[in-house]
Amino acid sequence: MHAIAVPNGSDPRLDGFRTLTDRQARHSHEAATGTYIAESFVVLERALAAGHRALAVLSQDKWVARLEPVLAAETPVYVVPAEVAEAVTGFAVHRGVMAVMQRPTPLTLAEALAGARTVVVADDITDHTNMGSLFRAAAALDADAVLLSRVCADPLYRRSVRVSMGTVFQVPWARAVSWPLLRAALVDAGFEIVALALTDDAVSLRDFTPGERVALVVGTEGDGLSDVALAHADHTVMIPMRDGVDSLNVAAAASVALWAVQGR
């Protein structure tokens, strides 16, 4: 790596680390540049292990020695004081390291499903914290892939990546243009589509017998699954819960369902 001391926050070499707290500006910047932000040494290490390329790193001095063994020789590491890091990014950088990463080529639905037996389908989950938590649950409970509906939050947005602890790099994922195309891809790959929802015809997860390949569809806590998602499901199941509690966080619900269908 190439360590460079940068004492001035106005230095243009730090431009890739700006507007991190402005979601709309950040989305526009990352879409235009094909990049994303990896925050913390652990997340950066997992991104590199997954084959992603670091374009530039922002670091405080105490982290430089740990970065040297993991970064390519040509990677610029901009070493800044804590106050400069905060001025540039817009928040106190407690985790010490932040990297501008090159986005990998997106997978197609067929590529994400190749060889898979259990997948999670995220329906219109727009909260980045929930998206990161969902990926962490999918990784922990051995889901083979995560598929996203068109309007889902970006799994590579900084907060999603951070909350996931880098597990967004471990679980293959792909985004669908529409539910008809998503259903077609799942059916072609031999999956039965199982929606988690509190509908009148929902079967208790305790009584549900999954097939060989299962796609679990999960939605938001408030609105639940969209009507179009329910219309494209083969089965609807619900997690039996104590009276007075009608929902779980999406990551918790996905965890329970993954454990149940893979334990049968």
Image (cartoon, rainbow, N blue to C red):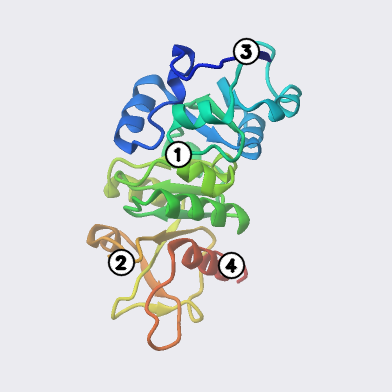
Q: Amino acid at mark 2?
A: Gly
Q: Which mark is residue 4?
A: 3
Q: Is residue 157 visible?
A: yes
Regarding mark 4 in the picture, which secondary structure is present there? helix
Q: Which mark is residue 259?
A: 4
Regarding mark 1 in the picture, which secondary structure is present there? helix
Q: Nearer the viewer, mark 4 or mark 2?
A: 2
Residue placed furthest toward the left: 227
Q: Amino acid at mark 4?
A: Trp
Ranked by sequence position, the earlier of labels 1 and 3 is 3
Ranked by sequence position, the earlier of labels 4 and 1 is 1
Structural distance between the alpha carbons of marks 2 and 1 = 31 Å
Structural distance between the alpha carbons of marks 4 and 2 = 23 Å
Regarding mark 2 in the picture, which secondary structure is present there? loop
- Residue at (64, 10) in percent of width and height: 74
Residue of label 1: 110
Q: Locate the C terminus by quadrant.
A: bottom right
Structural distance between the alpha carbons of marks 2 and 3 = 47 Å
Q: Amino acid at mark 1?
A: Ala
Is the C-beta separation of discs 4 and 2 under 8 Å? no
Q: Nearer the viewer, mark 4 or mark 1?
A: 4
Q: Is residue 117 visible?
A: no
Q: Nearer the viewer, mark 2 or mark 3?
A: 3
Regarding mark 3 in the picture, which secondary structure is present there? strand
* Residue 228 image point, x, y percent: 24, 58
Residue placed furthest toward the bottom: 243
Residue of label 2: 222
- Residue at (54, 48) in percent of width and height: 164
- Residue at (62, 34) in percent of width and height: 96
Q: Nearer the viewer, residue 167 or 83?
A: 83
